[in-house]
Image (cartoon, coloured by chain):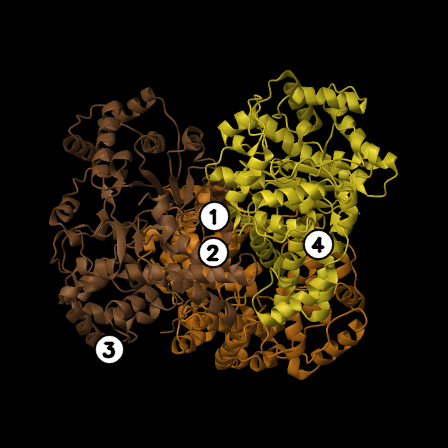
Chain colours: A brown, B orange, C yellow
Amino acid sequence: MSEDRYFSPDPAQRTLARTLYQQVQHLPLICPHGHVDPRIFADEFYSFGSPVDLLIIPDHYVFRMLYSQGINLEALGIPRRDGAPVESDHRKIWQTVCDHWHLFRGTPTGIWLRDELRDVFGIEAKLNSANAQMIYDAIAEKLSQHDFHPRRLFERFNIEVLATTDAATDTLPHHQAIRNSGWSGRVIPTFRPDAVLNMDTDNWRQQIEKLSDVSGVNIIGYKTFTEALAQRRAFFKTMGATATDHAALTPYTELLSKKEANAIFQRGLAGTADANEIRRFTGHMLIEMARMSVDDGLVMQLHVGSYRNHNQAIFEQFGRDMGADIPTATEYTRNLKPLLDQFGNHSNLTLILFTLDETTYSRELAPLAGHYPVLRLGPPWWFFDSLNGMQRFLDSIVETAGIYNTAGFNDDTRAYPSIPARHDVWRRACADWLAGRVMRHILDEDDAAELIVEMAYALAKRVYKL
Amino acid sequence: MSEDRYFSPDPAQRTLARTLYQQVQHLPLICPHGHVDPRIFADEFYSFGSPVDLLIIPDHYVFRMLYSQGINLEALGIPRRDGAPVESDHRKIWQTVCDHWHLFRGTPTGIWLRDELRDVFGIEAKLNSANAQMIYDAIAEKLSQHDFHPRRLFERFNIEVLATTDAATDTLPHHQAIRNSGWSGRVIPTFRPDAVLNMDTDNWRQQIEKLSDVSGVNIIGYKTFTEALAQRRAFFKTMGATATDHAALTPYTELLSKKEANAIFQRGLAGTADANEIRRFTGHMLIEMARMSVDDGLVMQLHVGSYRNHNQAIFEQFGRDMGADIPTATEYTRNLKPLLDQFGNHSNLTLILFTLDETTYSRELAPLAGHYPVLRLGPPWWFFDSLNGMQRFLDSIVETAGIYNTAGFNDDTRAYPSIPARHDVWRRACADWLAGRVMRHILDEDDAAELIVEMAYALAKRVYKL
Amino acid sequence: MSEDRYFSPDPAQRTLARTLYQQVQHLPLICPHGHVDPRIFADEFYSFGSPVDLLIIPDHYVFRMLYSQGINLEALGIPRRDGAPVESDHRKIWQTVCDHWHLFRGTPTGIWLRDELRDVFGIEAKLNSANAQMIYDAIAEKLSQHDFHPRRLFERFNIEVLATTDAATDTLPHHQAIRNSGWSGRVIPTFRPDAVLNMDTDNWRQQIEKLSDVSGVNIIGYKTFTEALAQRRAFFKTMGATATDHAALTPYTELLSKKEANAIFQRGLAGTADANEIRRFTGHMLIEMARMSVDDGLVMQLHVGSYRNHNQAIFEQFGRDMGADIPTATEYTRNLKPLLDQFGNHSNLTLILFTLDETTYSRELAPLAGHYPVLRLGPPWWFFDSLNGMQRFLDSIVETAGIYNTAGFNDDTRAYPSIPARHDVWRRACADWLAGRVMRHILDEDDAAELIVEMAYALAKRVYKL
């Protein structure tokens, strides 16, 4: 595989990109946002299971593409909600994946898996029907080795810090176990309270009861609700958290009076809050989370725009995270104004915005981040965590917001062994983009040499207070 | 004219693009969607008329650009609804076009006509005021030759199959005549029932009467209406159709009960349906068309987003298709959900989506097509059937949906002799795009060699069941 | 600094771009729209003050970026509304700017200031903390020279015509003084009546009184209001104006009857018009302005989509134009239809559209301008007056609208000494873009040689009737 992969075809730009890339190629990985399960680090001898357990069944990027071409999720071993049998022969599943490997041509999933097989597992061959079983064996063999336990990979991957994403009601036993083990790897939690802030969560009232239990605050109204949240934030901080994360369909925010907020909360407890009240309450709680961040210094992340579980039949049969989350057009300028009116100029808040609507890059997000001191722009997210996505992001954002109002990279993945490949794609994309700016004499080489370190490493560390 | 036209300036990418292009340059043309008049094939000796009859008067791409710079449609020979006289001297019209040929610099229309004049008519010169009459003569001379009859061009163009677009009430006499003639050219109809599904069509009730007549089903309500539609679909299938096509302002879908659907239908017959009912009925009928496609296997196409006849004065004076159709922002994620809830996972449906809102490529269409097994994405349509349009399409779609969830190319044209030029632009754009992926080591050359055949030929044939 | 700056890395394209650029590098500057204060030309010996007075305090592009990274506006010498003290040591302010100069890496502001310092002030060094004071001295020394008076710069910049932007109630004393001075520089006004057309302007009723005063028309209702506007337009024409300019949040237009218009106007005078009436009245007045342009031939400009003064605290403390104007999604197809229904086909109207929503380029603006004879598209505006912005504009617009439905360049700036740098970026971007089209054999070199002159000079002059 070429050392110049993902760089521009132009020979001069490519040479420059390579030089920039080599400056950061071996820097430690800062992973400030993602979905790796902390459990894998709690047990020193945790096993990933089979190659399919590791690479296919948990990765909705992989199986959604196969599903889109008519392969049933059952045939890929995805468990059904009703417990009905699904394919359990992992060799057969792997064969199906390899038989259809052409579907991933030109996709980030294809790139990540190729790079990961090569760099983590030492497999240079291109997947196909003929070599499927041989490669299955090769991966399985590696997975049985001590060097492939999660902690060993953490060290080999040169991860400086990895943040997980955890419910507000999580007591963080795995993080505690990691600490108690004396292992030096830095794995920290992130406070993600969606399930208690969004009243339309399944079993919201049970979530509130659980929040009462774990916080020791008896939640009987809005005041005790916010006290419990503050208590949990403080607990997460003691466990190393530096950030919170919030997901919503839209970035709608609205400041409610405490009286109004309590009235809606009470209707929520009584099960009588309507859709508009639920929306307003979530919008208010985003402002309240910003207020708490001003107090406790936790960096606030906002991921919006995904219509979750769009495929009703798949949701009913298989549940969430089945590759059926579809983006929607998103509006930030008006929706964020109430929050920014409250805290947009505050020196103790950092709010990192993510989008699934690329049209907002140049129209709304860059102008907002290029003005408000609290705002930073997260890297291209989800479908846009890709070579073209990164180029569009940088081309659209930087002229208005500059590099320093961005937040570096995060891999946002649950596919743990793909982490180095993902960071590598970002580092290469940034090196090539900067090289293109230098070729056009927009930046000089000194600027580019500083900026590649910022983009690959320093910005994420600084913005997330790591 | 350079053999490397439309390829990237980079010499290495260009060489690779040329190699890929040469693999598909001479493959037959698959034309699964377009607006060529079947009449031209019904008569073996059909004459196109003058160069202006062929190239200017039927082509709203050409005359809209001239109109936008102050040249009246009358001066271009476009017939008026009121029958008032318009320019009838075709040499004078041709001179006007050539006097303003600079307006087409950098446009696909300019490219197509240039390539068509060279490759179909053997004219290498660039159009200008001085050579206008000489070129008129040269085209006219060619058009008088036997080799320029439509069937001969069909063979010379190496068209494997050409689908026309035909009203639900069309009895397809020209397709019948083609069959009866014994000519081997494959010209098939496409079932396009907009005029009977959209109650706001001019003379909708007359359309329904006509549908009654041609189907032999006396349409007295929703049930008989759907029976008549099913009858027509079956008839189109017997005539070779493999697809339906549907146009609407938005992709709104909604499942009505049969009772509701009938109630609105009855109000439509009575002339009392309001705008919202009309919209809901069309949205319901799209789902009903999907249901019928599950039954009869016809591939369903959906072209949405055009605000038709935007220029009121031009519409009143000249009618439809006068270059005054303007795109609007379009939403797919929510609008298509009711249809997808019904049939999104069905193995016997193929639904091909087209858009005039490029923002939906990466935000909605690629994520939808990268999940739902029934969905495929049509090529860049209308204004985006252009070099930049194709590059933006591929750059935005492929990373999320892959190549195999696209539907290849279709020319969608009524300008018959421009068909080879249009396919050639697509084949060159794809070759160059793939070459760029190879240069960046995203694809290898073997992948690219397979994909260029898919994009140029095989995908369209397979997706449209041809 | 490379003579090839801002051109593509490809050596062949770069050579071609340089050749094209050199054809227009020294052509006079046409400045048909901008915000330079005419006062600076009224006094032959006008002084710009300190480097900070000239380059920082009036330029919200510069200080918004510093503000976004936590530097208070007070520390940059921006005057507060309440008169509270702000930093008055301009050397200290300049030091702060230079200490943070890295924030402007990759931004147009960074490019313009670099090019301006070099080409206007002869300063080759890159700004940094160490050289800040030395460069301050160098700029200050230049500013003290006779050659740096605004009129001398006008001549040195080779400005053929510069249009200012002036309120409808402005009596244009500075323009009169310029005329009376006998100086040959052509500085003309532009009629911008927003403050009297938009009833939600601060002090709208006072604006109407002022309009009564300056027009000599006693405004008692809609009829006298339009008479006063017509009188002012005629006055602006006598002072050399060739254009009007209009800003609004959206391009909403609606034709009201005179009776309705008068009823709303009366409620406006009484202070009882509601938000919807205000919106409808503005939408009506845009049509009325088009009608007057048909009469008097003034070219009409429409700048829409900016949510002004988004940061409430900054607005309260510092007022308008503080870098807190944020774009919003904009819809043209439906909004402009009422205006176009009235005047879209009229040979005596030119309406130039500007946008802050790049998604409308290919979806709405190019199709509209590629059909309606009255429409032209203004160059990329504000945040998009940048290298990437220009490339996206040309890539998205030209294939559908052609070059000849664009309106060339305007710098739209209040930063007078940056004018040559801004035009130079445009000329280089166009040369490179055309070179790319030639490399791909879309255009030939003769076309490109003509088009570069159109884009750099002739289109703006012709479309604005200069």
Determine the chain carrying the residue at label 4. B
Query: Mark 2: which amino acid?
Result: Arg
Front of the two marks 3 and 1: 1
Which residue sits at x=73%, y=73%? Answer: B126
Which residue sits at x=68%, y=71%? Answer: C444
Q: Is residue B245 above or below residue B252?
A: below
Determine the chain carrying the residue at label 3. A
Query: Mark 4: which amino acid?
Result: Ser
Q: Earlier in the sequence, mark 1 or mark 2?
A: 1
Image quadrant in which you'd find residue C323: top right
Contact? badges 1 and 2 (CB < 8 Å):
yes
- Percent across and percent down for residue A83 are 13, 54
Question: CA separation, marks 4 and 3?
Answer: 60 Å
Element under label 4?
helix
Question: CA separation, marks 1 and 4?
Answer: 32 Å
Q: Which residue is mark 4?
A: B68
Element under label 3?
loop
Front of the two marks 1 and 4: 1
Q: Which residue is mark 1?
A: A361
Tell which of B42 and C168 is nearer to you: C168
Quadrant of the image containing the N terminus of chain A: bottom left
Q: Which residue is mark 3?
A: A131
Residue at the far top: name it.
Answer: C270
Q: Tell me, for residue A392, which label it has, or none.
A: 2
- Percent across and percent down for residue C181 are 86, 36
Front of the two marks 3 and 2: 2
Front of the two marks 4 and 3: 3
Neighbor class of circle 3 (other Cα within 10 Å; few <14, some 14-19, many 20+) is some
Element under label 2?
helix
